[in-house]
Amino acid sequence: MTTRQTTALLLLIVASATLLVACTPRDALPGQIVFTRRDGDVNVLYKANASGSGEELLYRNEDATNANILNPAWVPGGRAVTFTAMRDGTWRQMEIDLATHEVKVAEGVPDLVSRPSRADDLVVERGSVFVTEPDGKRKQLYYHKNYDGKFNVGASEASWGPDRKYVIFQVCTTVRGCRVTIAPTDGSGAVAVTKGTRPAWIGPILTPAPKDT
């Protein structure tokens, strides 16, 4: 193979990889996400469109003992978000109303656990994400290069997105920090949408029609 042929082949490989990632345009991602992000010394709570646009700071905890926010999750229907945070020095399960931004102590056990995956059929190994299909075989949804388990840990906190067409997770490296990343289950390529950790995703939130008076 000549030098020119080798160069052409390398350019083709790079172009193919670029196209693979581009197959999941951010603007096509439905619904909204919540996640935490490091701000100074603590993790605060954010909400955004699944595309990463429209970011909104939802809540910053001010507890004197530990102000970090952990493991946000959507309340069914999307009217509120639950999360774990300290209140008066004690870990509590909290809830924020998205319409009023009122924060209150909620029912339930505080979730203090960091985990590779939040779903039984999603598997994270060596920073890469797989789905276990009905026949028991694994399909790779995201490949993390140069995993080392310390500085380049890759994916974790994997969970399902709307209609199980997507998977959302965090990807962390020492150099780049952590990114909220989304991968479609058709294998067309993952895309990082914003900086953050511990993401959760909900499909389009439908506003109820006003009742007739």
Image: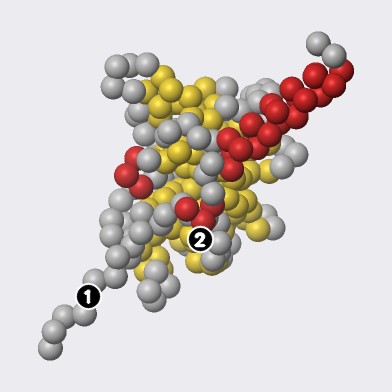
Residue 126, image x, y percentages: 57, 22
Decide which of tag 1 and tag 2 comes sooner along the chain. Answer: 2
Task: Locate residue 123, reporting x and y percent.
Answer: 44, 26
Q: Please say whether residue 144 is visible from this viewpoint.
A: yes
Q: Is residue 11 left or right of residue 188?
A: right
Rendered residue at 75%/39% (across/down): 175
Q: Secondary structure at mark 2?
A: strand
Residue drawn at (50%, 35%), measured in percent from left and top? Answer: 188
How far apart, in angstroms, are the residues tagged by discs 1 and 2? 24 Å
Instruction: Write down the residue under mark 2.
Output: 48
- Residue 149, by quadrant, is top right
Up-down: is 156 above or below 52? above
| As drawn, 48 above or below 146 | below
The C terminus lies in which quarter of the figure? bottom left
Q: Amino acid at mark 2?
A: Ala
Name the residue at 21% across, 80% down: 210
Whole-percent x and y of residue 29?
46, 52
Q: Residues within 10 Å of mark 1 (few under 14, many from 20)?
A: few
